[in-house]
Amino acid sequence: MTDIANIPELMAEIGARAKAASQILATASGADKRKALTGAADTVWARRAEIISANQRDLDFGSSKGLSAAMMDRLMLDETRIQSIVDGLRAVAAQDDPVGQVLDEWDQPSGLNIQRVRTPLGVIGVIYESRPNVTADAGALCLKSGNAVILRGGSESFHSSQAIQACLAEGLEAAGLPQDAIQLVPTRDRAAVQQLLTMTEYVDVIVPRGGKGLVGLVQSEARVPVFAHLEGIVHIYIDKAADAKKALEVVLNAKTRRTGICGAAECLLIHRDISKTLGRDILFALKDAGVEIRAEEGLAGPDGMVTASDSDWGCEYLDMIISAKQVDSISDAITHIRKHHSQHTDCIITEDAQAVQTFFNELDSAILMHNASTQFADGGEFGMGAEIGIATGKMHARGPVGAAQLTSFKYLVRGDGTVRS
């Protein structure tokens, strides 16, 4: 553990090395970046036993801190999840290189030719909580987009993240790229986070990925620009025109597949016309699956439902708990969602095309879904290979943030002795 007195010096050194690495990465070839990522994937798989051993130390630490079952699930790595990390690295490696991509091109009457092309952001600071796979996802996407990255993982995933970052560094070395392109802050001390948020000389953007507490801290204290990746307060509205089979399967998957991810459903809104039929059946199915239901008083459902309090609306449980409410119309559903959501992901289940259009037009969530599990709110499922997170803000990037979203653009203007009259 690094002594707190040395943290400003430590972070300045990390920042300076990242800045230097970013200048090399900005012109690195797509082939070299691809080689680094495929080499990292091979190393992760070859060292999977070491990574699982490191992860067990983190699990022991998390257990001693009293982490919930859902948080422990987020933290846990096994061979299947390590295979997913490997697959993600290979998928990002196989993507087209976004750097230098021409976004638009036109000629002006003055004789100028103008191109708008993708360019790296520079140095990205990623602050995340317990999921160690973010180490690989963030490292891969920043490298692919020509950015250096400073990773500051959660204290719970400290050893797992170190083991994964070492594999990424080996891939960089094998490809002849600077290992400083992907650095991990080597301390659990929170003073390192405070330092990272103010390193405007070295860091171009901060990406926080975690709960409201983390994101709020970053947004209030950062002097570096921030891409907000806020909590997932995810709603599913079951319309009166919903197909029963689709509704049942989608809701159960959205709530129970993995409760600890940001795309897990947290609130169910049921149209009054089906509340005593399909809505009731779905609530019974949720209870049978082990879900605690916190419902408004009078909602038809199984025995043992807990009466919802005001704090249940807009709550991210990340657990086998869901809130449930009856609404009179799609307008009422939209009003409730607008009041309580986090602009992450919301879903409508219906066979009514006009209802879908209304839902899509009137809500401003980063991701809106129709007849699909909200567990698909994931960059890998969007074909991005991986994601740094789901951006819930409205500036620069929204939704899953992949390699392309980690670029800006610049204008290339060409003339032939052209002067302005």
Image (tube, rainbow, N blue to C red):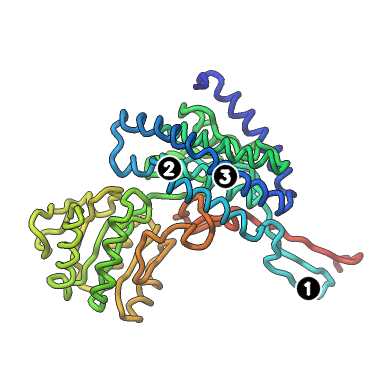
Q: Please identify, in this view, whether the residue under mark 3 or under mark 1 is nearer the observer.
A: 3
Q: What element carries label 3?
A: helix
Local crowd size for mark 2, using a 10 Å CA cut-off: few (<14), some (14–19), many (≥20) = many
Residue type highlighted by circle 3: Gly
Could you classify mark 1 by the number of other residues whose Cα lies within 10 Å: few (under 14), some (14-19), or many (20 or more)? few
Residue at image point 28% right, 41% down: 69
Q: Name the residue under label 2.
A: 131
**Which quadrant would residue 346 be assigned to in this image?**
bottom left
In the rendered view, does 222 fall on the left or right side of 111? left
To which residue does mark 3 refer?
Answer: 139
The secondary element bearing badge 1 is classed as strand
Q: Position of residue 382 (x, y in %)?
A: 49, 62
Mark number, residue 107: 1
Q: How far apart are marks 2 and 1 (CA)?
A: 48 Å
Q: Nearer the viewer, residue 400 or 380?
A: 380
Q: Residue 378 at what x, y percent from top left?
A: 45, 57
